[in-house]
């Protein structure tokens, strides 16, 4: 492998790393838009509660910069409705 090849690979790796950092920064910025309650039933969401954080579902629409949060019950109901619509 020549030094030019190594130089190209290093540059590609550096470019990929910068892109990942930009993507992560954008996603962390979207976290600020996270609501404090379920978007469907308005059940309060505690960001400090590990169980809530692990079980609730987040839907992000990056283009519109919309973040929606759903509790497990509302998420399950929505999944059932979608499944019924697909089967019909």
Image (cartoon, rainbow, N blue to C red):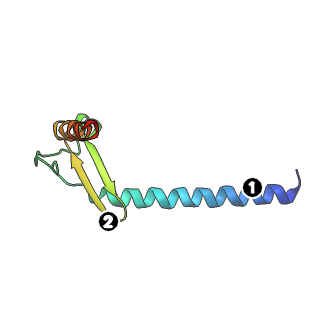
Horizontally, residue 57 falls left or right of residue 36, namely right
* Camera-nearest residue between 33 and 50: 33
Name the residue: 18% across, 38% down: 77
In the rendered image, residue 23, in percent from the top left (x then y), is placed at: 47, 58
Total numbered circles = 2
Badge 1 crowding class, 10 Å Cα cut-off, few under 14, some 14 to 19, many 20 or more, is few
* Camera-nearest residue between 54 and 87: 87
| Residues at marks 1 and 2, CA–CA distance in whole angstroms | 35 Å
Horizontally, residue 28 falls left or right of residue 44, namely right
Q: Residue 49, labelled with which disc? A: none
In the rendered image, residue 25, in percent from the top left (x then y), is placed at: 44, 60
Q: Residue 64, labelled with which disc? A: 2
Badge 2 crowding class, 10 Å Cα cut-off, few under 14, some 14 to 19, many 20 or more, is few
In the rendered image, residue 29, in percent from the top left (x then y), is placed at: 36, 61
- Asked whether the residues under the numbered discs 1 and 2 touch, taking CB atoms below 8 Å apart as contact, a structural biologist would say no
In the rendered image, residue 81, in percent from the top left (x then y), is placed at: 20, 40
Horizontally, residue 18 falls left or right of residue 64, namely right
Question: In the picture, which quadrant includes the C terminus?
Answer: top left
Q: Secondary structure at mark 1?
A: helix
Name the residue: 77% across, 60% down: 8
Farthest residue toward the front? Answer: 88
Name the residue: 45% across, 56% down: 24
Q: Residue 9, labelled with which disc? A: 1
Q: Is residue 80 above or below residue 29?
A: above
Horizontally, residue 33 falls left or right of residue 12, namely left
Q: Secondary structure at mark 2?
A: loop
């Amino acid at each position: 492998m020549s030094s030019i090849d190594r130089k190209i690979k290093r540059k590609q790796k550096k470019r990929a790393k910068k892109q990942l950092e930009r993507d992560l920064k954008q996603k962390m910025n979207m976290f600020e838009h996270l609501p404090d309650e379920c978007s469907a039933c308005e059940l309060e969401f505690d960001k400090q509660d590990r169980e809530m954080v692990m079980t609730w579902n987040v839907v992000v629409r990056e283009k519109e910069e919309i973040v929606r949060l759903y509790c497990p019950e509302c998420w399950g109901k929505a999944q059932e409705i979608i499944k019924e619509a697909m089967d019909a």
